[in-house]
Amino acid sequence: GMFSAANPLNSLEFGETNVKSFTGLGNIYGDYEIINGLKAKASFNVNYGNGSTFVFNPSFLGGVNNPPPSIPNSSQSKANAMNWRTEMLLSYDKT
C-alpha cells in the first residue's frame, strides 16, 4: 500500500519541537512646566521580542509520502527584534 504519513504516536514520543518566545512592551513619560503656560512632554517607548525554535525528526519517523527509514533532520532558528520611539512635545496655553 501507499505510505502517506508518519505514525502519529511515534511522532509525539520521539519527534521534538520546542518553541519559545517573549514579547515585552514598555514606556515612560514625563512632563514639565517650563514657565507659566509653556509645557514640555517627553516619552520613550520600547517594543522588544525574541524567540527560538528547535525541531528534530529521527530516521525512524518518516514523513508525508516518505516511509521510514528516512534521513534524520533537525533545524534551529533564533530571532530578536527591538523597536523604539521617542517623542518630544512643547505646548503653550496663553490664558
Image: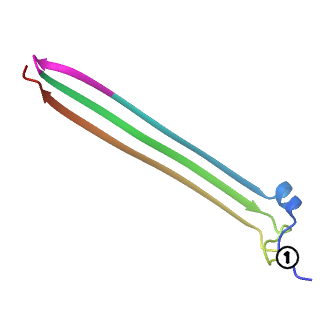
Question: Is residue 26 found left or right of 16 in the rendered image?
Answer: left
Task: Classify the position of the C terminus by image quarter.
Answer: top left
Q: Is residue 57 above or below residue 23?
A: below
Residue at 85% across, 62% down: 8
Task: Provide the major secondary structure of the magenta segment.
Answer: strand
For image coordinates 85% across by 76% down, the residue present is 67
Q: Quadrant of the N terminus?
A: bottom right
Q: Residue furthest left?
A: 94
Q: Give 68 or 32, whichever is nearer the viewer.
A: 32
Name the residue rendered at 53%, 46% in the picture: 50
* Residue 22 or residue 29, whichever sits in front: 29
In the image: residue 61, left or right of residue 29: right
Is residue 76 shown in magenta?
A: no
Q: Which residues are magenta?
A: 29-37
Q: Is residue 63 above or below residue 14?
A: below
Q: Position of residue 31 (x, y in %)?
A: 24, 23
Q: Position of residue 85 (x, y in %)?
A: 31, 41
Q: Which residue is mark 1?
A: 67
